[in-house]
Image (cartoon, rainbow, N blue to C red):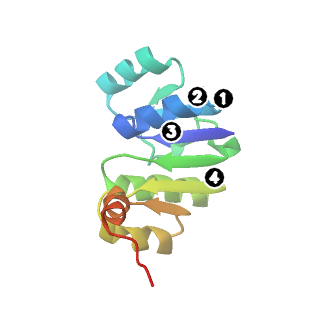
Amino acid sequence: MYVIVVGGGTVGYYMSRDLLERGHEVTLIERDARRADWLETQLGSIVMRGDGCEVKFMSQTGIERADAIVAVTADDEDNLVALQVAKRHFKVKKTVARVNNPSNVEIFKALGVDEAVSATEVLLGALEPPITT
């Protein structure tokens, strides 16, 4: 499976590393030059420096053959735009977002993102006791 990961922070780094270890083809996109350089020392040539929200840049990533794109930046708006570009312009089958503000989950879903994951909601769910009848 070919997966594009937008955002080379902690989540993007570990996701890309684990996908590689599982035998998947990965491209990791990072906007910040210094961070991209560090990521390349850790992960090799899978790292591309650029903006996952820009159609012209994304056309250079092989996105037309991507099976999935995952946007995990710290900015919900960037994640949403990157996934909408992937879905609408490049017809990527599976789009997955990290949603930082839990109130944005429904907006992401309404705007066509296949999976919108809020770490806050996941953690809160883990704290709540199971409902018994």
SS for callout 2: helix
Q: Where, by quadrant of the figure, is residue 106 drawn?
A: bottom left
Q: What amino acid is labelled 2 in the image?
A: Leu
Q: Measured from the top left, where is residue 34 in percent x and y?
A: 30, 22
Q: Which mark is residue 20?
A: 2
In the image, which is nearer the foreground, mark 4 or mark 1? Answer: 1
Choose the circle earlier in sequence order: 4 or 1. 1
In the image, which is nearer the foreground, mark 2 or mark 4? Answer: 2
Residue holding disc 1:
23
For the residues bearing labels 1 and 3, Cβ distance under 8 angstroms: no
Placement of 120 over or under 57, stated as above or below: below
Residue 58 vs residue 107: left or right?
right
In the image, which is nearer the foreground, mark 2 or mark 3? Answer: 2
Residue holding disc 4:
90
Residue holding disc 3:
57
Q: CA distance from mark 2 to mark 4?
A: 23 Å
SS for callout 3: helix
Q: CA distance from mark 2 to mark 3?
A: 23 Å
Please state, as top left, top right, bottom left or bottom right, where the C terminus lies in the image: bottom left
> Are there few (<14), some (14-19), or many (20+) residues within 10 Å of tag 1?
few
For the residues bearing labels 1 and 2, Cβ distance under 8 angstroms: yes
Q: CA distance from mark 1 to mark 3?
A: 25 Å
Q: CA distance from mark 1 to mark 2?
A: 5 Å
